[in-house]
Amino acid sequence: MRENTIPERVGSFKNLRSYSYIKPERKSKIIGSLEEAVNKVNLRDGMTVSFHHHFRDGDLILNQVMDIIADKGVKNLTLAATSLRKNHDEIIKHIKSGVIKKIYTSGLRGKLGEEICRGLMDEPVVIYSHGGRAGAIESGNLKIDVAFIATPAADRWGNANGVEGTSNCGSLGYTMVDAKYAEKVVVITDNLIEFPPEHISISQENVDCVVEVDKVGNSDRIETGSLRKVSRPKDLYIAKNVARVISNIKYFQNGFSLQTGSGGISLAVTDFIQELMQERDIKGSFILGGITGAHTDLLKKGLFKKIFDTQTFDLQAVKSLRENRNHMEIDASLYASAFNKGSLVNNLDFVVLSALEVDTDFNVNVLTGSDGFFRGASGGHCDTAYGSKVTIVVAPSVRGRIPTIRDKVTNIVTPGKTVDVVVTERGICVNPEREDILKDLKNVKDIELIDIHELKDKVESLTGKPEPPLYDEKITGLIQYRDGTIIDVVRKISDRY
Amino acid sequence: MRENTIPERVGSFKNLRSYSYIKPERKSKIIGSLEEAVNKVNLRDGMTVSFHHHFRDGDLILNQVMDIIADKGVKNLTLAATSLRKNHDEIIKHIKSGVIKKIYTSGLRGKLGEEICRGLMDEPVVIYSHGGRAGAIESGNLKIDVAFIATPAADRWGNANGVEGTSNCGSLGYTMVDAKYAEKVVVITDNLIEFPPEHISISQENVDCVVEVDKVGNSDRIETGSLRKVSRPKDLYIAKNVARVISNIKYFQNGFSLQTGSGGISLAVTDFIQELMQERDIKGSFILGGITGAHTDLLKKGLFKKIFDTQTFDLQAVKSLRENRNHMEIDASLYASAFNKGSLVNNLDFVVLSALEVDTDFNVNVLTGSDGFFRGASGGHCDTAYGSKVTIVVAPSVRGRIPTIRDKVTNIVTPGKTVDVVVTERGICVNPEREDILKDLKNVKDIELIDIHELKDKVESLTGKPEPPLYDEKITGLIQYRDGTIIDVVRKISDRY
C-alpha cells in the first residue's frame, strides 16, 4: 500500500504560477527523416529494437532502418522482429559486422535462415510464437527499447492504422503490443492523414515521433508465402477431408468458432466449410487469426458474427476490416498470450494448421525443413493448438521425396498433446488420447482413419527412411513454447552435411 | 538486456507430454453471486478496491459490494473510486467501522463529503483529476488489487460494454484503465449477452470473473448532477457570451476542437456553437470528454469528424456511441493522462468549464463550497485547462448571496496559469498573460471585457466580503494536480463553524 506524505498547503497561490503549469507547446510529432528518428530516440549500443511483418515480403522498412542504424555505428543490438522473411537476407551483413548480436523472431527463411543454421551468430536466435511474444513483452521478459512501426496511414500526432492508403496491409495486431510496451515508438508512414483518422490502431498516447517516407511496403505482397491458390487435386482432396472431419465432430454446431490459418490447403478448407454451413443451416460465432477474403465472405453472408483479425492476408480482407464493424482488429495478446486472463485462442472450437513435419507422437514442426534449416515460422501454431477444442493439422504425406510423417520431427514447435487430428491424402490420424473425436469419426462414410504409426510406415515404404541432418553441438536456435519454456533447440548444421 | 540460459534439448519427446501441454478446461467465468466474487478474488485486509461512477447517481453496485466486504470482516481497505456521489453516503458506516481506511476519488458530495470535512477519517481523502487518476495507475503509484466493474452488458468470458441492455450508461472510459491494470477484475452485469458481443470495451483478457445481478444501475440517472436544462435568462446570457468569445478567437476555424463539459451553462454553449458553425460554414475536428445529445447532433450533421467519449451524459449519446463508428469510446489515459506520450486534452482548442469559485489569479475551485465543504469533483477540469489552447471558465458572478469571484478560492483545483477567460453575466475577464486573446476580443461589439479585480470589487459591493470558513489544523483532503503533485489541502471544518 502506498503511504502519502502530507505536505503543508503551498503558502500563497502566487507560488503556483510555476513552470509546470504552463500550457504545453503544441508541436507536431513529425520529424524529417529516419536518420533524425534514430537520433531522436537516442538509439545506443545494446538496445533492443523491434519491427513487424504485417507487410510480409512487401516490407520496405526493416532493412532501411537497420542500414541507418549501422551507419550510425551502433553495435550489439537485439533485433526483436515479429517475424523475419526472405526479404530480410540483407541483415546478414549487420550480423557479420556486429550491429545485430541477437535475434528474437517467429520465423526465419531464405539465405538468412540458412546462414544462421551454418553458425552465423554467436548467440542462438530465439523463436517464439505470436502469443509467446506478446506474453514475453507483457510479462517484462522482453523489453523493447525502440519499436519502429511502419504504417499505411498516420496523422501528425502518431495515430495510425493499416487500412487506409496505397500501402494498406490491414490489421496491425502484432505490433500493437510493441506500441503499448516499447520505451520509444517511431511511427513510419507513406501516407500522412488528417487528425483525427477514422481508424486508430496505434494511438498517439504511445507514439514518440512520426516519419514520412516514400513507401513503407507493397501491399500487393501481403499475400506472399502464406497464400497460394490450391489447384492440385491432392491438396483439394486433403481440404475436402478436413471439412468432412470438422462436419462430423460434435462441436460443429451453431455458435462454433474457427481459425483456418494461412497455408494453401487450410484456406481451401474455408470454402468447403461455407458450403457445409449453408447446407446444414449452421451459424458460427467467430473467426480468428489470419484473415482472407474467404473469411470475410463468411462474415458478410451472416454465417459468422465476428472476425477477430491479427493479420490480414489479402486486400479483400483489408477492405472488410476498413468497412465492417464486426471485422475487428485485435492485438497479439488478446489473440494468443498465455500471460493474460483469457486470450481468444482459448475460445476456439476448430483450428486448421499446416505442418512441415508431424511425428508419431503428433508433435509438429513448422519451423525447420527435414534438412535442419530454418524454413518457416512458429506463428500462432502452438497457441491455437493449445487453446482450440479440436486441432487439425493438414499436410501432404510426402513432399518431393521427403516424408512428412516421421518417427521424430526435426524440431518441435507444437507438442503432440495439443494436436488432435492429422489429415493427409493417405488417411486421417486421430490422436488416441482424443477418444471423443475417435468416436465421432469412426464408421463415418468417406473418412478413412489410420493409425499414425501405420501411416508413417506406409509413407516410408514409398520414400525410404529419411536420413537426419548432420549436426554440430553448437546451438543456433532456441524454440520457446508459448509459456516461455524452451521446448526445443536448433543445432548448427555440420559443414560436412 | 536479458540473458538466456541455453538448456539441453529435452531428452525425448515423451517428456513433453507433461501437464502444461494439456488443453485448457473451458470454464465460463460466471460465478453465482457477489459474495462468491469477493471470496474468489481473495479480498483481504489492507487491499485497494475500485469502482466507477459511469452511472452517476444511478449506481447500485458500490454500496452493495462494500456491504458484502464489510460482512466478511475485511478491514483497512483503500477505496479508489473514479468518483463518489450523493448515493454513496451509505459508506459512512464502513468508514466508522474501519472497513474503509482511505479514499481516493475525483469528487465528494452530500453527507459523506460533509462528514469527512467534519473529521470522519483519520487519513485525508486524496482527490485527483480523471487524467491524474489514469496517470497514477499507469505509473504504478496507485495499485488496484480488485476492480469491481458494473457493466450494462457482458458475456460469460468477461467481454463487456456500456451500450447494450436496459442499464446502458455509454462509455466505460474511466474504468477501462482499472480493467487493464487491476490485479483482479470482477465484471458485474444485469445483462448477460452472447459471446462475442458487438461492442467490447472491457476485454476478456483482463477479467477474472463475471457476476450476474438484478440491476447494476439506473440509466435514467446518468444525467443527474451534471446536466440541467438551462432556462434562467442569466445562464443563457452567459452561454451566449461564451459563444461570442469562442467565435471571436482566431482558433475558431476549420478543424477546431471542442470540449464543453457538463455544467448547465456549458451545455447551452454547445447549441450556440452549432448555430455559429453553420452560419460561418466552419467544420470542426473532434469533440472530447463528457458527451451529450447536443454533441452527437453536431457529429450527425457533419459539423465534427469525431467524438472521443470518456463519459456519456444522456441516452441519446449512448445510442450514438452504439451506432456511430465516429463516436469513439476512449479511456481516461488517452483522454487526459500526463503520464503518456500525448493525451487528447493536449489537442484541444477550446474547453468550456464550470466553476464554484474563481479568484483574481484565475485559480479555479470546483471541489469545495465557499463554506469549505466538499460539494463537487475535480473531474477533467485541470486536465483540459492545461491542454486546451483556450480555457474558458463560466460561472454566475453570485450564487445565492455568495460571490463566485474572490480574492482567493477556498480550494484550488485548477491553477490560474492554465485558465484564460472567465465569463460571467457581469462581464468577461481575460487572463492578462493571454495577450493574444485580449487582442482578439478587444473592441468586439457585445463583448464587455472587465479586469478580474474590478469584477471582484463590483460583486463584493453587492454581496459584501464573504467570511472564510473556520478551520482546524487537521487535513481532511489532499488535492492532487494531474502530475501527481499536491496542489492544495482541505482542512477540517471547525466544530465552532
Image: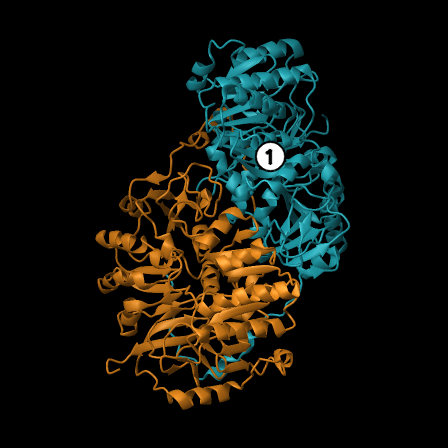
Chain colours: A cyan, B orange
Q: Label 1 marks which chain's residue?
A: A
Left or right: B234 in relation to B434: left
Establish if B39 lies above or below A415.
Answer: below
Whether residue A257 sits left or right of residue B188 in the image: it is right
Say if B346 sits above or below A60 in the image: below
Q: Nearer the viewer, residue A98 or B436?
A: B436
Within 10 Å of the Cα at label 1, are there few (<14), some (14-19), or many (20+) other Cα atoms? many
Location of residue A114 in the rendering, given as x and y in whole percent from the top left corner: 71, 33
In the rendered image, which quarter is residue A493 located in?
Answer: top right
Quadrant occupied by the N terminus of chain A: bottom left
User: Who's the residue at 54% across and 52% down the image?
Assistant: B327
Residue under label 1, please give it. Answer: A290
User: Which residue is at 77% across, 50% downward?
Assistant: A214
Whether residue B458 is visible to the viewer of this picture, yes or no, is yes
Asked whether B316 or A287 is in front, the reply is: B316
x and y percentages locating residue B143 in the rendered image: 41, 57
Residue B6 visible? The answer is no
Q: Position of residue A285 (x, y in %)?
A: 49, 32
SS at mark 1 in the image:
strand
Q: Name the amino acid, label 1.
A: Gly
State which quadrant residue A270 falls in. top right
